[in-house]
Amino acid sequence: MTRPARPTRDRSATGFLVGFLVVALLIAGGLSYFASADPDGLDSVTLDGCTVTETDAGERLDGTCIAQNAEDHALGSGPLADYAVDGAGGTVGLAGVIGVVVTVLVAGGVFGLLRRRGGPGGPGGTSGS
Amino acid sequence: MTTAVPTAVHVTAMHMSDGLVNAPTAAVFGLVAVVAVALAATRSRADLDDRTAPMAGLVTAFVFAVQMINFPILPGASGHLLGGALVAILVGPWVGTLCIAIVLVVQALLFADGGLTALGTNITNMAVVGVWVGYGVAVALRRVARRSRAGLLATAFVAAFLNTVVAALAFVVEYAVGGAGGASPGTVLVLMAGLHALIGIGEGVITAATVGAVASVRPDLIHLLRRGSTTSPTSPTGTASSAGAPARADEGSPA
């Protein structure tokens, strides 16, 4: 692989970061439709010993298992709860895209505030940003 | 015994709900999480500059995205990325701790995924234990990782596999300390370890693929491969802000 040349580093960096973001958006917005709906490792363990039955009131757990102690989420009626927009089916992709955008803004803000201004490696902070 | 729980709780939830451990246990691990995140915020500054801060932001969003993708491991059971080794290799353990903690907070507050009082245990398991186990393994194998591309991918795989298994064991510890009941700790141990050994394979594949992709394009952005990158670079007291220190913390690197 060719090593990015120094002078084009800024452009290369921007391109890489944009590419990274696009990949994250495609995964959250598209690939998420193909995710397994089966309980994950932890949920499989907490449900061990129970049979799950779908009812109008929700899922009913018969038997004895850890998940019977699980409490409803305090924000379980939020607009994006359970990766659905307003609880509507088929919106996991949109919810995922929103999640990626929110996450990149929050994380970008946190890391932007924490960073040392003017990189040490670059000659005098370069010109970027 | 019959309990009604809301639909979808078990379909899309990926992390510990509230109530799985008792209140004192949740409080203790909440404190652990607060201290760990505060320490990480202090120490991560050494690893964050104009070049790495945007990278860290995007790595965080990437982990959020990939955590949505549950992959099948057994009939009726799935797994998903935790991301500890991935972030540790790409952005370092201090920044990585913050990455995973941010993902967990966004998931809990916005998506009702992972309980609010369970944030402490979830952050402890994935942002602290997962990240630091992944980092420890990766550092132990750093010579292998630097030698060849295959070595880098193998390092990423092994670190990710172990970060998954040990993070799962952290839950077992919490359950043994203050679990709400419903299953014996021994059963929980066997099931958690077994299932997460399988999930760890998926975690290893995803982590190796991602690290490999970054290495193809921007190997200079991989924290693990950076020269002189150590966990404890400078003491936070040495605020050389804008002092144009040329070399990267070769001077005075105690402990």
Image (cartoon, coloured by chain):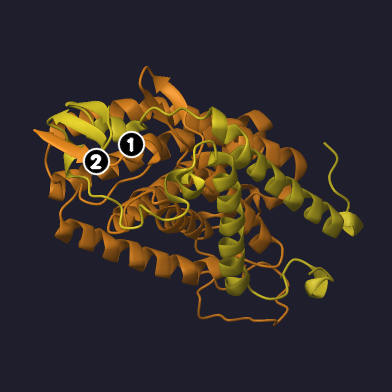
Residue A62 is left or right of residue B65, and the answer is left
Circle number at residue B104: none
Q: Nearer the viewer, residue B75 or B223?
A: B75
Identify the secondary structure beneath mark 2: strand
Residue B59 in the image, given as x and y percentages of width and height: 60, 51
* Count of marks, rendered view: 2
Residue A82 in sight in this render: yes
Amino acid type shown at disc 1:
His
Residue B216 is left or right of residue B6, and the answer is right
Q: Nearer the viewer, residue B32 or A78?
A: A78
The residue lying at 29 percent from left, 30 percent from top is A44
Do callouts 1 and 2 mark residues in contact (Cβ within 8 Å)? yes
> How many other residues sit within 10 Å of disc 1, few (<14), some (14-19) or many (≥20)?
many
Amino acid type shown at disc 2:
Val
Residue B190 in the image, given as x and y percentages of width and height: 22, 28
Q: Nearer the viewer, mark 1 or mark 2?
A: 2
Circle number at residue B5: 2
Q: Chain of mark 1?
A: B
In the picture, the quarter occupied by the N terminus of chain B is: top left
Q: Chain of mark 2?
A: B
Q: Nearer the viewer, residue A30 or B70?
A: A30
Mark 1 sits on what residue? B10
Identify the secondary structure beneath mark 1: helix
**In the image, farthest residue toward the front:** A56
Q: Which chain is yellow?
A: A
Q: Nearer the viewer, residue B228 or B241?
A: B241
**In the image, farthest residue toward the top:** B75
